[in-house]
Image (cartoon, rainbow, N blue to C red):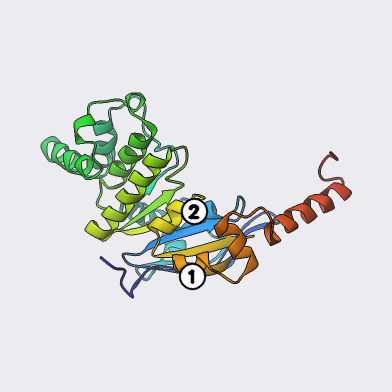
Amino acid sequence: MPPTDENIIECRDVTVRFGSQTVLDSLTLNVKRGERLVILGGSGAGKSTLLNLMAAETHATSGKILIDGKNLCAMPEAERDEYRKSIGVLFQSGALFQSMTIGENVALPLREHTDLGDDTIETIVKIKLELVGLREHAHKLPSQISGGMKKRAGLARALAMDPKVIFYDEPSAGLDPVSVTEVDQLMIGLNETLGVTTVVITHEMVSAFRVAHRLVLMDQGKFVADGPPDEMKNSDDPLVYQFVNGLAEGPLADRRDRDAYTADLLGETPAL
């Protein structure tokens, strides 16, 4: 199912500051309904902060985040809680409760946020686990399954409430290449089958190019590039080209060396 022309998320001039540090600097971003958007950027670029904003886990200093036209930044907390129930988040580790079985983990949001009976919840859990290929492992504890299976179990839990958007925070982190491919195919399949809007943060470029309808690149709290995978891969911008192709030389490396030298001269870091 291709993305529509309708925006499900609109970030308008979003700024986040922590003290004197500006983490996000007047960002503007539209996410289309049904789109698979991948957000790229180096450490400290502001990716996780942006994801946390869109998932209603933190607040912007200024600007608007519109969800289906409603300003998330101006919502009272009760309404923000309702919004959180309409989205899914897959954390880096899967964030499963170790004392609960896989099935119990998936059932948890249904037990916490609905009045559904046990039989209905059990059926929903089976359906969600089947979607990620884990139905036969429902009785196992997280310690009894592999890293890739933990990610899939976390995704099943993220799907429990039939979200309209799923946010993925480094879904490939800590996985072997085969598991990365499996998770990527699962993200694509869920997007195409269920039409769920997909927003991914990743450093894994092979995964990013495989999954994305569109890529955006962040640098120092701003967007510096936005486009489909082929366009980004062959960008004429030296900074974009260096990042997406994983090159050691280029403006990012030059800036890092220059900033480190300046900090050393100012006594902000110990001399080597």
Left or right side of 128 for 67: right
Of mark 2 and mark 1, the one earlier in the sequence is 2
The one of 15 and 41 positioned closer to us in this rendering: 41
Asked if the residue at tag 1 contacts the one at tag 2, i.e. Cβ–Cβ closer than 8 Å, the answer is: no
Name the residue carrying label 1: 231
The one of 237 and 13 positioned closer to us in this rendering: 237
Q: Amino acid at mark 2?
A: Met
Identify the residue at horizontal 42%, vertical 62% (top origin). Answer: 72
Instruction: Give the percent coordinates (x, y) of residue 178.
Output: 37, 40
Q: Quadrant of the C terminus?
A: top right
What SS does tag 1 mark?
A: helix
Calculate the distance from the C-alpha at mark 2 to the C-alpha at mark 1: 14 Å
269 up-or-down from 214: above or below: above
Q: Quadrant of the N terminus?
A: bottom left
Instruction: Give the percent coordinates (x, y) of residue 174.
Output: 47, 37
Asked which quadrant contains residue 124, the reply is top left
Left or right side of 251 for 113: left
Disc assigned to residue 87: none
Identify the residue at horizontal 37%, vertical 34% (top origin). Answer: 96
Q: Amino acid at mark 1?
A: Glu
